[in-house]
Image (tube, rainbow, N blue to C red):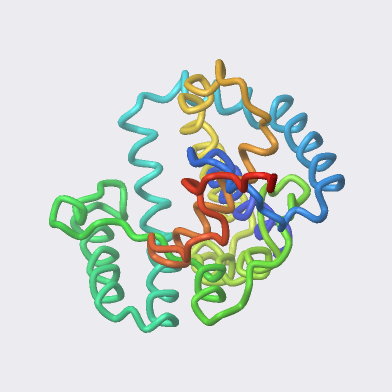
Amino acid sequence: MFRRCFSTTAAIALLVGCASTHELPGDDTDSLESYNRAMFAFNDAVDKALFKPVAKVYRRVLPEPVTTSIGNFFSNLNDVVVLVNDLLQFKLHLAAMDSSRIVFNTTFGVAGLFDVASRMELPKHDEDFGQTLGYWGIGEGYYLVLPLLGPSTVRDSFGLAGNFFTNPITWATDSDAVAWGLWGLDLINRRSSLLRIERALADEQIDPYSFQRGAYLQQRRNLVYDGNPPKPDFDFDAEPDQPKP
């Protein structure tokens, strides 16, 4: 059970960690920066030695239509997690749309291999237990880099458990071998999808750790507040205070 939880959260963390947003100036949630930077370096070394090489072979061997269908399959399973969190946040309109997505993609989309729901104006949504905790007023807490799992916060770390237990891979099969295979395939498919993003960012002169931290925190805040996070206490356009004569 623990091993399957590890695999799914690793896939989620690898995907979220490379989101293309910018860091919030003046952010004070990284009180554990020394630990986080050390763990970031460890995770990066493991990724370069293991996950990235496997993802490159995976992308080279399988044609894009196949990898797209694999991504659609796991996205359809994730819609169950999204639906549960729609209901927990009383987003009934989204719940109706996401339940329809599951039905249409599972049936007409051949077990989710084809995303027919999006063509029917039923777009993919993004809800999880970390967002639900934020919806009910629980603060994000410190920024954390989890061993192998990547960027998170205290709140999102608790949310990962809920995501795991509601994902159909956890409860829809009694075979550990099948579950292992599915989690691993999802992980590699997600990791391979980030290769192009990495190439696009390769020439940027940025601190990778700060970029990942800012990307993760801003994306999560946008998701919790449905794209309308509260304004920070600082003003980007304000003129700096002038010294008194």
Where does the image place residue 42, in percent across and percent down from the top left? 81, 36
Residue in front for this viewpoint, 112 or 173: 112
Please, which residue is most extreme toward the front here? 245
Where does the image place residue 109, in percent across and percent down from the top left? 23, 52
Residue 12, above or below 39: below
Residue in front for this viewpoint, 62 or 68: 68
Q: Residue at x 62, y 40 (%)?
A: 212
| Image quarter hosting the N terminus | bottom right
Residue 165, above or below 15: below
Q: Quick check: 74 left or right of 153?
A: left
Q: Residue at x 58, y 56 (%)?
A: 179
The answer to whether residue 117 is visible is: yes
Residue in front for this viewpoint, 164 or 230: 230
The answer to whether residue 184 is visible is: no
Residue 184, above or below 167: above
Count of numbered circles on the image:
0
Q: Quick check: 133 left or right of 122?
A: right
Residue 239, above or below 138: above
Q: Quick check: 102 left or right of 85?
A: left
| Image quarter hosting the C terminus | top right
Q: Residue at x 31, y 53 (%)?
A: 112
Q: Residue at x 46, y 24 (%)?
A: 196
